Image: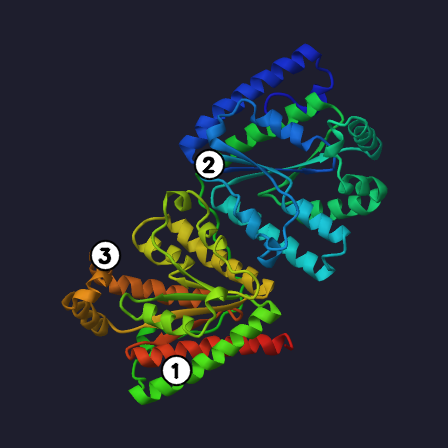
Amino acid sequence: MSDVKDNEIQKLSQDEMKKILKDTRQKLAQQQQLIKEKKLPVIVLVEGWGASGKGTLISYLIRDLDPRFFQVVPMKMPTKEERRKPFLCRHMEHIPESGKFVFMDSGWMEETVFDVVDGKCTKKELKQRLSDINVFERQLVDNGYLVLKIFVDVSKEAQNVRLQNLLEHKDTSWRVCKRDLDQQEHRSKYEKAFGTFIKATNSEKAPWHVIDSSEKALVELQVCHLLVDGIEDAIKRNEIPVEIPENPFPLVQMPKLADVPLDKSLTRAEYEQQLKAAQKKLKKLHNRIYKEGIPVVIAYEGWDAAGKGGNIKRLTSALDARGFVVNPIASPDVHEKNRHFLWRFWTKLPKTGHVAIFDRTWYGRVMVERLEGFCSDNDWQRAYNEINEFEKNLTDWGAVVVKFWIHIDKDTQLERFNEREATPEKRWKITDEDWRNREKWDQYEVAVDEMIAKTSTQTAPWHIIQSKDKMYARVQALNVVIDAIEAKMKDCNY
């Protein structure tokens, strides 16, 4: 701690302790303005035993803070609907905007430990979940967050006394739940689960701090110091570029866009016949994925005027309207800009058995944000690995992930731009931004080639769709989706 060491605290008088606490609280209140200026988002995760004083500790920490710039999130066990999304989804939803605090009363630790104790999480699932949590926390820190993780410890004897005191009074007995009593009865089982979790997720970038709750004033002082020091360290750390890791994902070798032929086409009769057959097949598969609880994520990227909208329309025509959503992705709004760049996509993921289609995607980070200077070089260079990790999380969850680059050449784009401007009912489709992007065609082509090369993983490969003939592109995309779903069905023996 910055002002006083642990072994010195025991020697302090009550008056000395009160003064240090007051000074530390004042410093924390002053730091709130500093994190706003430095745009530092702060997550304080408070985990621990039942009746250990987690809620009291959070109330103490926020007492002098401006309530406009923090949020307290009490995380209960997930609902049935929440369990139909990836494990981390509901936790990612609550991360703070830049310059704000989020205090979490329990979170991904409690949920995991309780699932382990209740037999809802196999050893294989636990290993995967712990890996996902480490990636989640590391990505947050790499993207500028402070993640402070506190575990409030209490002995079995002290916990029992606190629970009995709460149960003796009608105004406090409601605070004791079945889980608290179960922790008392099966203490060793919970100790093992908590210990395993802490050991597996205690990283250099997001370490655990285990606090003995036996002395209230000491707990408050320790945690205040951890938070004050953590904010100072995070501000300094964020001034240093993050090291770009080697790509650990097996990749599928892909051609450069310039080497992709654009000579495929269909006659109107061939198109109508093949489209009808493919849509009929996909309609049946939609019923099957709903029955088996398989989520499907379809990502569309491509050149302006390549035909993404018409492609999506033919795809969704084969789906039950109750089982899919199309997410049109525009420039991020202020709340989205102030969070991890993947946050707005985590919040739009489908439930099991449903389909989520993204009309433009998280790949904006390594294309438009890269070329227009909306993020730093370190941000977009690091994003390839972060995107691969995100997509691996989806496929490990059980999702089918299909990624399309809808491809045309420069001359075809010009023809379509001119056609849109000359056709009143299509004129809304062409903007000044489209023309500006066209001027940077060569730069975008370099960025897209690099994007495809670095993110076409074996579990989430890219599919470059020839779209000089829109009819051919629509049928081709439908068939790719069908093949991906059927492959998933086969792998799962459905």
- Residue beneath the point at 51% across and 23% down: 29
- Mark nearer the N terminus (2 vs 3): 2
Judged left or right of residue 288, residue 344 is left
- Mark nearer the N terminus (3 vs 1): 1
- Residue beneath the point at 37% across and 49% down: 332
For label 3, count other residues whose C-alpha is less than 10 Å away and answer few (under 14), some (14-19) or many (20+).
Answer: few
- Mark nearer the N terminus (2 vs 1): 2
Q: Is residue 224 visible to us here?
A: no
For label 2, count other residues whose C-alpha is less than 10 Å away and answer few (under 14), some (14-19) or many (20+).
Answer: many
Q: Quadrant of the C terminus?
A: bottom right
Q: Secondary structure at mark 3?
A: helix
Question: Camera-side residue: 95 or 444?
Answer: 95
Image coordinates for residue 418, horizontal then vertical, percent: 16, 69
- For marks 2 and 3, give the CA distance: 32 Å
**Which amino acid type is marked by label 1?**
Leu
Contact check, label 2 and label 1, Cβ < 8 Å: no
Q: Nearer the viewer, mark 2 or mark 3?
A: 3
Q: Nearer the viewer, mark 3 or mark 1?
A: 1
- For marks 2 and 1, give the CA distance: 51 Å
Name the outermost residue toward the left.
422
Contact check, label 2 and label 3, Cβ < 8 Å: no
Q: Which residue is mark 3?
A: 433
**Which amino acid type is marked by label 2?**
Leu
**Which amino acid type is marked by label 3?**
Glu
The disc at residue 40 is 2
Q: Which residue is mark 1?
A: 275
Image coordinates for residue 226, horizontal then vertical, percent: 60, 30
Is 456 rendered above or below residue 15? below
Q: Nearer the viewer, mark 2 or mark 1?
A: 1
Question: Camera-side residue: 136 or 404?
Answer: 404
Question: Camera-side residue: 338 or 266?
Answer: 266
Q: Quadrant of the N terminus?
A: top right
